[in-house]
Every structure is written in C-alpha cells, then in structure tokens.
Image (cartoon, rainbow, N blue to C red):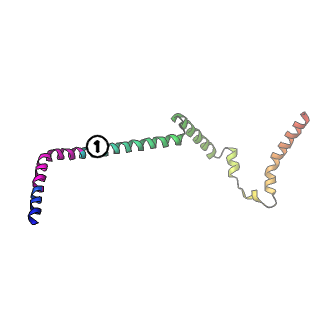
C-alpha cells in the first residue's frame, strides 16, 4: 500500500517537473503580458475617469450659464454693477423712498399710509376724470 502510494507520488513529481521545465517560459510570458495589460487598463480607466470629470464640469458650467456667450454675461454684470452704483449713492428717488423709515406703514389708524398715498391718489383721480371727460 505504501509502496504504491510512493510510486504514484514519484511519478507525479517527475511528470510535474517535466511539464514545469517545458512550460515555465510560456507561463512567465503569459503572466507578464497579463500584468502589462492590467496596468494599461488601469491607466486607460484613469484617463477615461479624468476625461469624464472634465466633461461633467464643462456641462455643469454650460447649464449654469445657459449657453450665454461670455461677452453677454460680462455686459449683464456691468449693467448690474452700474445700477447698484446708481442706487448706492442715495440720489435715486426710488432708493431714497426705500431707505425712508417704514414705521408708519403698519400703523393701526393708517394715517401715515394715507398721507403718503394722498398725492398719488389725487393724481390718479385727475387722470381718471380727464379720461372720462374725453370719452
């Protein structure tokens, strides 16, 4: 029984040694090629990931600006800055009215609101009367 097992083991080792001796260069070449392909695939994946990130950022910028040309955006920014400067110096009537104290707007008796609205109401009534007379 032991002899038979020993002969089988020796036979296996001789066969394995012969196959290893004959195929070792082919096996090494195969694994080397596989390692190089994996490394190349990893580099390609990294490049593709970077390209996808750049594309995503570009699309986000395009969505943010709705495809407006850069010159148009600059012009809009300049116009906004000009308007802010106009309103910021306090000479604009709308700004002065907006900066006025707003205490009486929510008063109980409404006297402050009526005093502010009176000139506008009178002008509106004159316009309505003129429109009615000319009809």
Q: Residue at x 91, y 36 (%)?
A: 133
Residue extending furthest toward the bottom? 2
Left or right relative to 19: residue 98? right
Q: Residues within 10 Å of mark 1 (few under 14, many from 20)?
A: few
Q: Is residue 110 above or below residue 130?
A: below
Foreground pick, 79 / 14: 14
The quadrant the C terminus occupies is top right
Mark 1: secondary structure: helix
- Residue 30 falls in image quadrant: top left
Q: Is residue 84 above or below residue 113?
A: above
Foreground pick, 40 / 133: 40
Tell me residue 27's x, y (percent): 18, 47
Tell me residue 3's x, y (percent): 8, 64
The quadrant the N terminus occupies is bottom left
Q: Residue at x 68, y 51 (%)?
A: 99
- Residue 2 falls in image quadrant: bottom left
Q: Is residue 62 above or below residue 103?
A: above
Q: Residue at x 57, y 38 (%)?
A: 76
Foreground pick, 70 / 114: 70
Left or right relative to 1: residue 72? right
Left or right relative to 7: residue 86? right
Examine the structure image and report whether residue 32 is included in the region drawn in magenta. yes
Tell me residue 122's x, y (percent): 84, 45
In the rendered structure, which segment of residues is drawn in magenta? 12-33
Residue under label 1, please give it.
Answer: 40
Q: Residue at x 56, y 40 (%)?
A: 77
């Amino acid at each position: 029984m032991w002899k038979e097992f020993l002969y089988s083991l020796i036979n296996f080792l001789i066969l394995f040694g012969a196959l290893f001796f004959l195929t070792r260069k082919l096996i090494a070449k195969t694994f080397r090629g596989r390692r190089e392909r994996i490394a190349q695939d990893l580099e390609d994946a990294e490049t593709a990931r970077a390209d996808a990130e750049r594309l995503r950022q570009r699309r986000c910028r395009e969505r943010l600006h709705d495809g407006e040309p850069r010159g148009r955006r600059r012009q809009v920014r300049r116009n906004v800055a000009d308007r802010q400067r106009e309103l910021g110096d306090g000479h604009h009537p709308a700004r002065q009215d907006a900066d006025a104290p707003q205490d009486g707007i929510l008063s109980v008796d409404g006297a402050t609101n009526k005093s502010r609205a009176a000139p506008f109401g009178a002008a509106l009534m004159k316009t309505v009367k003129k429109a009615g007379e000319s009809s």
